[in-house]
Amino acid sequence: MSVTIATAPGKIILFGEHAVVYGRPAIAAPVTQVRATAAVEPNPAKGVRLRAPDLSRDYGLDDAPIDDPFARAVQVVIDASGPLPRPNLIVSVSSTIPIASGLGSGAAMAAAVIRAIAHHLGRPDLADDGRVSAMTYEVERLLHGTPSGIDNTVVSYEQPVYFVRRQPQNLIETIKPATPLRFLVADTGVTSMTRDVVGDVRRQWLAQPGAFEEIFDGCGRIAVAARQAIEAGQIERLGQLMRENQDYLRRMTVSCPELETLVAAAGGAGAWGAKLSGAGRGGNMIALVSEESEGAVRGALLSAGARAVFTSLVG
Ligand code: PMV
């Protein structure tokens, strides 16, 4: 029996999280070491079966809760494939991307499922990066209300992107680092729900619009400068910009003691710069390192309580 497989990577946000929801530019990159994988095969029985063996889940599409992101991903692509009789499929997902930790696990799962089903149904047009990204966005909306669109974009295009949320169409530009950027990604071990953190930032923005607009503007300026530094290979400058971005994220109250401890440990051990990545209040932080400083920074992060540390090269 033919099985169709597709994968999608995790992601890190290098600059501009939260401010990107409010139309400021941001930069994100795929993390190819961790991936979501979807496998699609014909179902000998009638209907669509959803399987997530890692989570011990096996259920029918029609029995899925209304807010189930896996079922939504399957439904979105089946709907897009047109008014055909609904196919009989078994869709299985697995992932090495830690959940609720700012690495884009939900978006990657959706993108892998959408791409695998599109290919399986003989619809490569629906598996095109732009279409996968748009459908993944629909699933992201279920996960966290007002997503900016950066997560679905980076996991679908699988390239570093400079992204601006705007109407009628988002600005998406892929970027090419002049030299590969070496990041350590360190997990605080604290999970946090993007939806809650994004909602809390919104409440604060509504209560103090002036102060928050100024913070978002600052993050936007940093993202613009960071893009130039990435394209010019100015690593030291990039590290400085990460530190400045972290200052703004702290003012947004999306950092937390565990993140601050890791950021300080990375800085103390010789990282060019470090900041939280993603929604914050837990999840992962990233540190920009050189080949020479990598070992010391990794050791410092683990001693400071990081649950896991891995290297991710961008470019
Ligand atoms: O999904 P996370 O935790 O990586 O966070 C997404 C980044 C935010 O800017 C906080 C939200 C968004 O939709 O862009």
Image (spheres, rainbow, N blue to C red):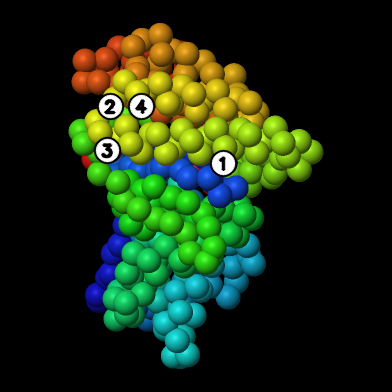
Looking at the rendered structure, the secondary structure element under dot 3 is: helix
* Nearer mark to the viewer, of 3 and 1: 3
Image spot of residue 158 (x, y percent)? 31, 52
Q: Distance between the residues labelled 1 and 4?
A: 18 Å
Tell me the number on the disc at residue 180: none
Q: Name the residue under label 3.
A: 231
Q: Pointers 4 and 2 in contact (CB under 8 A)?
A: yes
Viewer can see residue 45: no
N-terminal-most mark, 1 or 4: 1
**Residue at 60% across / 60% down in the picture?**
142
Q: Residue furthest top?
A: 268
Identify the amino acid type marked 4: Leu
Looking at the rendered structure, the secondary structure element under dot 4 is: helix
**Residue at 30% across / 46% down in the picture?**
175
Image spot of residue 253 (x, y percent)? 65, 28
Q: Mark 2 points at which residue?
A: 234
Q: How far apart are marks 3 and 1 (CA)?
A: 22 Å
In this picture, is 245 found above or below 217? above
Q: Mark 1 points at which residue?
A: 19
* Nearer mark to the viewer, of 1 and 2: 2
Q: Distance between the residues labelled 1 and 2?
A: 23 Å
N-terminal-most mark, 4 or 3: 3
Tell me the number on the disc at residue 238: 4
The one nearer the camera, 195 or 149, is: 149
Circle 1 residues within 10 Å: few <14, some 14–19, many ≥20 = many
**Residue at 52% across / 35% down in the picture?**
219
